[in-house]
Structure formats: C-alpha cells, structure tokens
Amino acid sequence: NVGFKWSLSALRRHFDDQGLDYAEVWSQIKAIVTKTMMAVEGPMNTKFKMLVPNRRTCFEVFGFDIMLDSKLRAWLIEVNTGPSLSAPSKMDLHIKHKMVANLFNLVGIVPYDRAQFAEAEKRRRMERITGVSFSGRGTTKKTVAARRNFKA
C-alpha cells in the first residue's frame, strides 16, 4: 500500500492481521459496482446501439474509487469511464499490469511470441508457394503426389 491506495491483496492481509471481516467489505464493494452498472445499463445500451455496429468488438474499462470509513462501510467516491493507466509507483504498475492482462484474457486476446509468429507465417507462405507441407500438418496436392510416386 502507498499512501491512501491499497491493493486488494494488501487490504486483505491488513484485515486478516487485524481480525477484521474482509468478506463483508468485499461483498459491499461488489454490491456497489453491480448496482452502479445496473443504474447506467439503459443509457449505455442506447449508446452502444447507436455507435457500435458489433458489440463483440467493443469493451470499456471503468475505474471505481471506493473509500472505507472508520466503521468499514464502503462508499463510492466516483466512477471513471477512462481511468488512468499511468503507473507512477511500483504498486500502480503491478496492479494495472494485472488488470490489463485480465482484461485481454476476458476479451479473448491471446499473448504470443513475435519471433515464433513470424516464423510460422514464413512457413505458411512457403507452404502456399511450394505446395509442400513443412510442418507435417495437412497435405497438399504435391505432397500427396510425391507420396504416391515414392517407392520404398
């Protein structure tokens, strides 16, 4: 934790150390987020229908600022529709990196190795040009013909 910012894992450890009920606070936070999103669902759906031709190609990140009072009651401070992804501290970098990674997983973006991808593309181009399968997957007309003419 840095100043007034806490990661959820740091908050949970603090609650465990102090013997406080983290599950109750987390339940309050989830209720706040759920009710907030339900309150704006209608206007959001209208905007989506007007501006987004295919909803599967669009997503939005919301940043919820929630404060806990001295009685551990959760309060919504604000919701940001374009939360900052800058990371002025190591904690911010850690939290935001994980958040973006989870976001990419949710929307179906799969990480890949650029060098491996480039090599696979090169191999596919060569297979298309030559008609010969270098990967051992699939067969082409030339490989089938070569197998027929091959005498062991």
Image: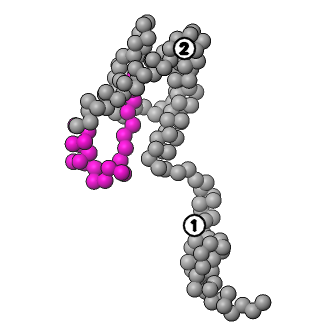
* Upstream in sequence: badge 1 or badge 2: 2
* Visible residue check, residue 126: no
Task: Report the quarter where the C terminus lies.
Answer: bottom right
Q: Amino acid at mark 2?
A: Phe
What percent of the width, then of the height, locates residue 124?
58, 71
| 70 or 24, nearer to the observer | 24
Residue underneath mark 2: 15
What percent of the width, then of the height, locates residue 8?
52, 23
| Residue 116 in magenta stretch | no
Q: Is residue 117 left or right of residue 32?
A: right
| Residue 59 in magenta stretch | yes
**Which numbered mark, 1 or 2, is in the foreground of this view?**
2
What percent of the width, then of the height, locates residue 142?
61, 86
- The answer to which image quadrant residue 62 occupies is top left
Q: Amino acid at mark 1?
A: Glu
Residue depicted at x 35% and y 20%: 76
Name above or below for residue 12 compared with residue 141: above
What percent of the width, then of the height, locates residue 73?
40, 12
Q: Which residues are magenta?
A: 43-65
Element marked by disc 2? helix
Mark 1, other Cα within 10 Å: few <14 / some 14–19 / many ≥20: few
Q: Which mark is residue 121?
A: 1
